[in-house]
Amino acid sequence: MTKLFMFEKPVGMRDTLPELFQLKRQVRDSISQEVARWGYAPIETPTLEFYETIGAASAILDQQLFKLLDPDGNTLVLRPDMTAPIARIAASTLRKAERPLRLTYDAPVFRSQQREGGKSAEFEQIGVELIGDGSNSADGEVIALMMASLEKAGLKDYQVAVGHVGFVNAFLYEILGNESRVDAFLRFLYEKNYVGFRKEVDQLALSSIDKRRLKDLLQLKGGTEVLAKAESLVESQEAQDALAQLQQLISVLDAYNLSEHMLIDLKLVMHMSYYTGAVFEAYSSGLGYPLGSGGRYDELLSKFDHPEPATGFGLRLDRLTEALGKTKESITNDVCIIFSNERRKEAMEKAITLRQEERTVVMQDITGIKNIDSYSAQFTEVVYFVGSNGNGGGAR
């Protein structure tokens, strides 16, 4: 190993030090407990999957996949998301299980990033998948659960934008009528490059009315009034049907009393191509990227020869801890027992007693400490078993 790489990490990889690890664990535990209360069962999938199945089904760009070969020459990938692996399980091992399935996960995923991007290539996702239920109630449930999870984690200042992929696709095809054109405009929307969107509209050989309709799409964000505005812009039955589904979903969410943290955004587009219906993203003030997202993906399981409806969400644990803005507190341990060799047995007995009282105890040989005062400052209580007398330990 050369000195150049001795302290370096691969691009996009990060260390998690004890203080941040403790904060992430608190957030993770609070979300996991809430998800369990809603009846979702935990599940794990392998870190490595076959490229031909999960790599293709995940809808992650090929250049973002971490690939390697197994001894038999098969191409493997580090899982780039959790939805595709869970879809594989639902279509195989759980194929005959009672529907709907409610599954939850908490796992790291891996996506290769450009060197100049500064993004994490490994990050932890925690989320749910609701498989086998095509109703608006299922979409409403996962959105409501994501909001409940954010609040249980301690986040109060957040907003969830809800849209419909079917509406955006139908509206763009209605005007542009060309798949390559539609894909180009979907890219602008996904990147939230609305300036580029408008400039591209101006270059099109369309009527002034259609150009205005395309630009009006960018204004379809707000309360329920945007549904009426959207209805006046579209002509196709597909777009009208998508708006009707979204209206029904809003009615479901109203029953959860979630309007305070929710808005409608009909230009919302997700990076995953497998989404087919309602989609949503969670934001927090002061954070320039989503905390989490989700939506309906009714066609994904057909890639595993078991078509059925599904919906779900995933939260980014790293972004959520950042949004919470909590100060990472220094780790302060409970009790330290400092002992000398001749009183080791007494120290061990004391440690056993304290641990039975649910105390956290560190045992430290005095010969292994360079500075007793600075070392002891880490602990709430320090008990000494040093010297040759047998009268017990002293505490501070």
Image (cartoon, helix red, strand yellow):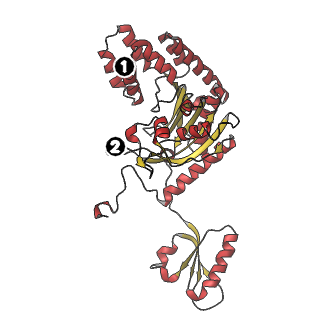
Residue 344 in percent (x, y) is at 60, 84
Residue drawn where x is 53% and y is 54% of the image: 23
Q: Are marks 1 and 2 in contact (CB under 8 Å)?
A: no
* Kind of residue at disc 2: Gln
Local secondary structure at mark 1: helix
Local secondary structure at mark 2: loop
Disc 1 target residue:
181
47 vs 5: above or below: above
Q: Quick one: quadrant of the N terminus?
A: bottom left
In depth, the one of 392 and 345 nearer the eye is: 345
Task: Decide if residue 351 is on the left or right side of residue 65.
Answer: right
In depth, the one of 335 and 380 nearer the eye is: 335
Disc 2 target residue:
114
Total label count? 2
**Mark 1 or 2 closer to N-term?**
2
Task: Decide if residue 5 is on the left or right side of residue 172.
Answer: left
Q: Quick one: quadrant of the C terminus?
A: bottom right
Task: Decide if residue 122 is on the left or right side of residue 86.
Answer: left
Residue 82 in percent (x, y) is at 53, 41
Q: CA distance from mark 1 to mark 2?
A: 26 Å
Residue 55 in percent (x, y) is at 46, 39
Res 324 visible = no
Residue drawn where x is 37% and y is 25% of the image: 194
Res 82 visible = yes
Residue drawn where x is 39% and y is 27% of the image: 187
Residue drawn where x is 37% and y is 40% of the image: 63
Q: Is the residue marked by circle 1 packed among few (<14), some (14-19), or many (20+) residues within 10 Å?
A: few
